[in-house]
Structures are given as C-alpha cells and as structure tokens.
Image (cartoon, grey):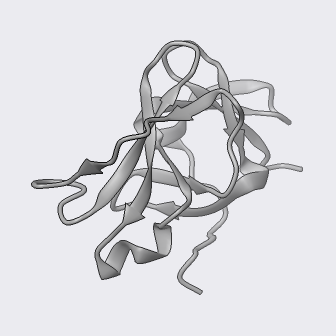
C-alpha cells in the first residue's frame, strides 16, 4: 500500500514499529500513537510524574530504543482528561524517529510526514 512505513530509531535505525499499527497522530504532542511496537522498544519500570511542561499532571513510562538507549516516546499511565484517550498506547516522538516508506524505498524525517487521519477520540 502507498502509505505503509516502518518507524526507525533516529539514533541507530533499529525498527521500532510500523504504520499498520498506527492508531492516531497527536500534532500537539508531536507523536505517532501505536497500539503495538517491536521488541526493539523497551520501557522503564518506574513512572515519571510530570510537574511542568509535558506531561504536567500525567504519569508515564519512558520508551527507549533497546539497541542504542535513545528515548523514543512514552506510555501514559494516568493522564488529564484531554489526554486520557492516549492511556496505554505507545506514543513515539516524531522528532526521535525516521520513517522508511516501503513503496518508495526512501527514509524521511517523521516530522515531515502526515499519515491519513486517524484518531482515538472517535
């Protein structure tokens, strides 16, 4: 399919996920929201509590690349009402990943791509 992509770590190009498991995009946060990622993504056992900036008022687990250790996103554990729809999903920072477009055989910055509109709010 035209829009299929593989999400790679910006630091080492390890495969983190793909667009088939993409379930939302959050432009405000600059994240791609997936319901599944590869074994190349790990998360900490301890929660991070946001006291300022994002995720103020939220508790989340940091996601990192298993290969190089770069922080690539988060999983919200508890959230304010306007972010509650993201709880339990894998949120990958667009500025921490690259997208390999399967049909075009090219790699581009995730910040430069918009996938077809999907949202968890519906």
On screen, residue 76 versus residue 16, left or right, reads: left
On screen, residue 20 versus residue 76, left or right, reads: right
Location of residue 10 with respect to 6 vertically, above or below: above
Which residue corresponds to the image point at 62% horizontal and 69% vertical from the top-left?
Answer: 117
On screen, residue 119 versus residue 96, left or right, reads: right
Where does the image place residue 35, in percent across and percent down from the top left?
Answer: 67, 58
Where does the image place residue 80, in percent across and percent down from the top left?
Answer: 28, 75
Point out the image quarter for the C terminus: bottom right
Q: Which sits in the foreground, 33 or 106?
A: 33
Which residue corresponds to the image point at 32% horizontal and 82% vertical from the top-left?
Answer: 81
Q: Quadrant of residue 120?
A: bottom right
Which residue corresponds to the image point at 89% horizontal and 50% vertical from the top-left?
Answer: 1
Q: Point out the residue furthest to the left here.
A: 52
Q: Which sits in the foreground, 48 or 93?
A: 48
Q: Which sits in the foreground, 16 or 77?
A: 77
Location of residue 52 with respect to 80 vertically, above or below: above
Q: Point out the residue furthest to the bottom here.
A: 122
How many numbered tags mark residues here? 0
Q: Point out the residue furthest to the front here.
A: 45
Which residue corresponds to the image point at 53% horizontal and 24% vertical from the top-left?
Answer: 65
Q: Quadrant of residue 21?
A: bottom right
Where does the image place residue 28, in percent across and percent down from the top left?
Answer: 33, 62
């Amino acid at each position: 399919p035209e829009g299929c992509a593989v999400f790679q770590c910006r630091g080492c190009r390890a495969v983190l996920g793909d667009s088939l498991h993409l379930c939302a995009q959050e432009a405000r946060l600059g994240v791609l929201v997936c319901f599944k990622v590869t074994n190349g993504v790990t998360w900490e056992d301890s929660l991070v509590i946001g006291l300022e900036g994002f995720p103020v008022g939220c508790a989340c687990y940091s996601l990192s690349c298993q290969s190089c250790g770069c922080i690539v996103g988060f999983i919200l554990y508890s959230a304010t009402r306007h972010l509650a729809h993201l709880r339990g999903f894998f949120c990958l920072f667009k500025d921490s990943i690259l997208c390999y477009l399967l049909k075009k055989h090219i790699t581009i910055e995730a910040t430069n791509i918009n996938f077809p509109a999907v949202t968890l709010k519906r």
